[in-house]
Image (cartoon, rainbow, N blue to C red):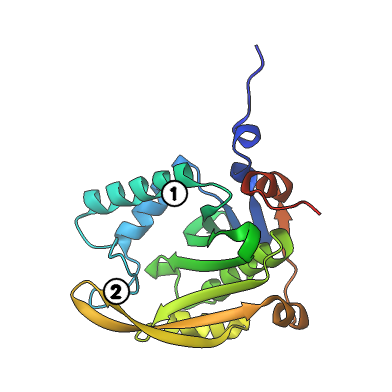
Amino acid sequence: MTTTLLTEAWPVAALRVTEGDLELRFADDDLLLQLADLAVRGVHAPDAMPFLVPWTQGDPAAVRHGFLAYHWGARAALSPDAWNIELAVLVGGEPVGMQAVFARGFPVRRTVETGSWLGLEHQGCGIGTRMRRAVVHLAFAGLGAHDVTSEAFADNPRSQRVSEKVGYTANGAHRTSRGEEAVEARRYRLPRASWLASERPEVAIHGIEGVRRQLGVPLG
């Protein structure tokens, strides 16, 4: 009897993006459990909330449960017209956070958005900028995106600085709600032409052909 490999049945499982000792990798269940434990140890200061959905709040069991349910749901919902690829971030083989890239109507719009988080113990040493550069390379060089966008609350200067370091420029703002609070969210945009004109580190993408087929992105 022939056994089908997961990477054959679900090509996104083979996706890897590497830059030096930093790696973005499909988050299998073992990695998700490690990342859930990392999140439980802390992602932000107790008096801050950088996320639209406050998934980091609650007791450890609730955070783990919500984390796993969200990621399993994102896998199941993936389709060419609407997808969210959540990649584990590893440095020297150690899981340190997650980097997401998501899109709606990508075959037509060719625009993606990014989102991410890092464990508190790994913040402040440049990892956030490196992982964003890696996922931007995936979007442009791997998936053929025309634009990459990002968004951050006005009171989240770290995320804004990462966008600016990678080459995004301000692209407006809007009012949104964060729980019971009205807050300003700032948008950033990086067009393909600006990315091509910038200096970039060496980034390698593995398994992209199968990912493009799964997402309905032309291979040419």
Q: Looking at this view, name the residue that lies furthest to the right.
A: 220
Q: Amino acid at mark 1?
A: Ala
Residue 185 is left or right of residue 112, and the answer is: left
Q: Is residue 171 above or below residue 13?
A: below
Asked whether residue 21 appears in the rendered view, the answer is no
Are circles 2 and 1 on residues that touch, CB within 8 Å?
Answer: no
Which of 5 and 185 lies nearest the eye of the viewer? Answer: 185
The one of 111 and 23 positioned closer to us in this rendering: 111
Residue 49's disc is 2
Q: Quadrant of the C terminus?
A: bottom right
Mark 2 is surrounded, within 10 Å at the Cα level, by few (under 14), some (14 to 19) or many (20 or more) other residues, namely some
User: Residue at image x 60%, y 45%?
Assistant: 12
Helix, strand, or loop for circle 2?
loop
- Please identify the residue farthest to the top as the structure is shown: 1
Question: In terms of secondary structure, where does tag 1 sit?
Answer: helix
In terms of depth relative to the viewer, which is nearer, 123 or 207? 207
From the viewer's perspective, is the residue at label 2 or at label 1 nearer? 1
Residue 200: x and y, percent? 73, 76
Between 91 and 168, the one nearer to me in the picture: 168
Residue type (three-letter) at the residue carrying disc 2: Met
Q: Where in the figure is residue 174, as x and y percent of width and height?
A: 38, 84
* Residue pictured at 74% horizontal, 82% vertical: 198
Circle 1 residue: 74
The residue that appears at 40% across and 45% down in the rendered structure is 73
Specify the quadrant that holds the N terminus: top right
- Whichever of labels 2 and 1 marks the residue nearer the N terminus, that label is 2
